[in-house]
Image (cartoon, rainbow, N blue to C red):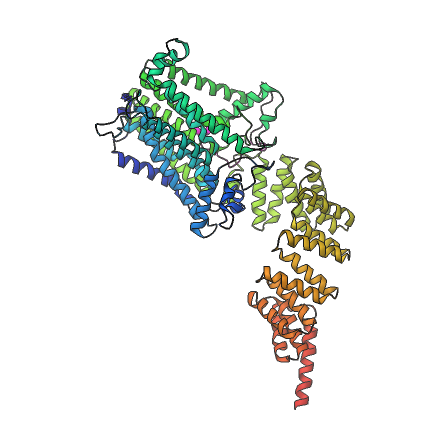
Amino acid sequence: CVIWDPYWDHHIPLPKLGPLHSRLVTAFVALISFINSYDGDFVFDDSEAIINNKDLNPDTPLSNIWKNDFWGSNLSSNSSHKSYRPLTVLTFRINYLLAGGLHPIGFHVLNVALHCVISVLMIDVFAILIGGLVHDGKGVKLNLSPKASFLAALFFAAHPVHTESVAGIVGRADLLCALFFQLSFLVYCKAFQGGDKKFSVLWIFSSILLCAVAMLCKEQGITVLVSENMVSLFWPKRSLDLVSTFFFSTQIGGLVSSGLLMRLALLFLGGSFLLYARWRIMGTGPPSFTEVDNPASFAENVILRIVNYNYYYSLNAWLLLCPWWLCFDWSMGCVPLIKSATDWRIVWPLLLWCCLMGLVYQALCSQDSNKRRTLTFGLVLLVIPFLPASNLFFRVGFVIAERVLYLSSAGYCLILAYTVGYCSCNWKKHKVCAATLTLLCVNVARSAQRSQHWRSEQSLFTSALSVCPLNAKVHYNVGKNLADRGNQSASIKYYREAVRLHPKYVHAMNNLGNILKERNELKEAEELLSSAVHIQPDFAAAWMNLGIVQNSLKKFDEAEQSYWNAVRFRKKYPDCYYNLGRLYADLNRSIDALNAWRNATMLKPDHSLAWNNMVILLDNTGNLAQAELIGKEALKILPKDHTIMFSLANVLGKQEKYKESEGFFLNALKINPNVASCHGNLAVLYHRWGKLDLAKRHYELSLRLDPSAPGTKENYNMLKRKLEQRQRTVG
């Protein structure tokens, strides 16, 4: 077996715990760091990936998760992000089944539990990377670096940059990917139980299979094979000599006998097959992103693009070093582009590369073999899992994403643990111990605080205002959250700021236009929505909202054209057909209105407003028999819709089907007993029917609920006169 002697492990200022106790402590630290997210809401991307994702619904065929992307869109669609993660979606679906619906607590608890398991497994991963592979006489793997691997795992368990992956439910993709990344690596190491030259091909194939599982959780899983290749190169005792031989020597026989070429070939072939399969799954090629998603990748100047990519890398490194400025989104002006050599921020990528080159030099040239191996494997874990997010191979859809650092942070934690051990060898141990404990406590506290932010959208979005005040999306999300909670007046300020920061932010324009429409500020609403569709001509929702505003402004021809534009860009748009029907009704084009509403109900059978409007329109135009048929058809689909019951009861009453009408009125009142108009119309029915005492009772209930109800007071006075007349006649 490969045995290294990490002498610096003995100097780590931690007690030497047994395997069980170190795992329990690591799991506990991971738990207390993120436990307060367990009862949080669905936030941010959870809406699209979980709440609006039909693949989670038990009624949806299970096969759909293998055909659709992470967000529930078909992979063949041009709008698909091509994020193929069926196993992650499957766990969401299991959560849905176990909870009997979309209850976030189960989703959050599983995320926290996964992070605890991953943190515990990191002890084994770090132990192998630091202390090598050694087994006792019974084949049990020994940990030759118990303190160092334990400390690195503690750093990993409490790192605040993990909050997005743990507290955000969609971060489960990163958690599951990391879990199977670890298992693939540990199984690969299992192949060498009989020694470096004797390895099991079966275990290596098992490792490749687990890599495939990791990829089905998140695409980043492929990097485990690259990491295993790097470990294979640096595995032997004299790793540098072997690498030199590999590249420069003509004596290949030694490499063949060592099994290195065979291992590398197996991993390369397995990785190539997985990449080919992944490419075929994408179908129509890579996803398309906009300049807003990743502005640096759209820079025409190659030098400018490279400089900004490197600036992004330095910001990611800073998040690992000082995870205080954390934000749910780093796009839309949060990180302005470096456009000239005089921009002072160019210092950061230079500093990053100086540090990396220093680490690489120490990893390759240090006389201390332990330092070489630890730093080498630390850099491998730091850099390799980050490569898919680096823009080197393909354009990614973000500027910075904290979740992609989940695996890379393991490399940072390994290097940090070595730094603590090195300082303990050369400095006063009690000072190093105090600094280490302080860092751990600060990280735990920061993780707990950040988890608190992720409990609700309000706190998450608001927390980003101080971190990314130039981010238009932050202001947009704060405004949207306020509007969703009914505070539209406050949301206007944030929507306006989002549009100011990003003048082409069509979604902010659309939402602001909607609020202004409801506040009857129609001119400005029309200007905003017109700008939105001019910037993005296929924005169907903005076309529909523009049509609503134009209808309110009596611009009927323009409104009709806007509605049809919306339908042209979104074929299945029931709400647009509903609003088009309202326009036709206002223009007394009854047949066109009925056709539009019928289209709405065909596209969305439970469209209550469209059904109800059809019944009312047919009632108003005297087509009572057809209105009755439509109303009863609607109630087969919406058996508990009290508004349709009310409209149908009115139709039946006009046909003098009093008993049937009464039944629908009473059912409607059973569902919603506080509707004044329903009591009033039922009273009119009883009045016509001759049940005057019941009519009196419901008139009084209606007036109690709404004293100003039109016509009710007059009808009630007529009834009272009739009752008085009857009483005089009886007397």
State the image coordinates of residue 504 (x, y, percent, origin top left).
Answer: 66, 35
The residue at the point 65 percent across, 54 percent down is 601
Asked whether 84 or 330 is in front, the reply is: 84
Give the extent of the magenta segment: 318-340
**Count of numbered badges drawn on the protein:** 0
State the image coordinates of residue 713 (x, y, percent, origin top left).
Answer: 68, 73
Asked whether 213 or 27 is in front, the reply is: 213
Residue 30 visible, this angle: yes
For the N terminus, the quadrant is: top left
- The furthest residue to the bottom: 731
State the image coordinates of residue 639 (x, y, percent, origin top left).
Answer: 57, 62
Q: Is residue 281 magenta?
A: no
Location of residue 19 with respect to 658 vertically, above or below: above
Q: Main secondary structure of the magenta part?
A: loop
Asked whether 682 or 264 is in front, the reply is: 264
- Asked which quadrant contains residue 647, the reply is bottom right
For the C terminus, the quadrant is: bottom right
The residue at the point 66 percent across, 64 percent down is 629
Location of residue 174 with respect to 555 vertically, above or below: above
Q: Is residue 166 left or right of residue 580?
A: left
Q: Is residue 66 left or right of residue 158?
A: right
State the image coordinates of residue 107 (x, y, percent, origin top left).
Answer: 44, 45
Location of residue 621 with respect to 475 vertically, above or below: below
Residue 233 visible, this angle: no
- Asked which quadrant contains residue 268, the reply is top left
Q: Is residue 321 left or right of residue 603?
A: left
The residue at the point 58 percent across, 39 percent down is 475
The residue at the point 69 percent across, 60 percent down is 614
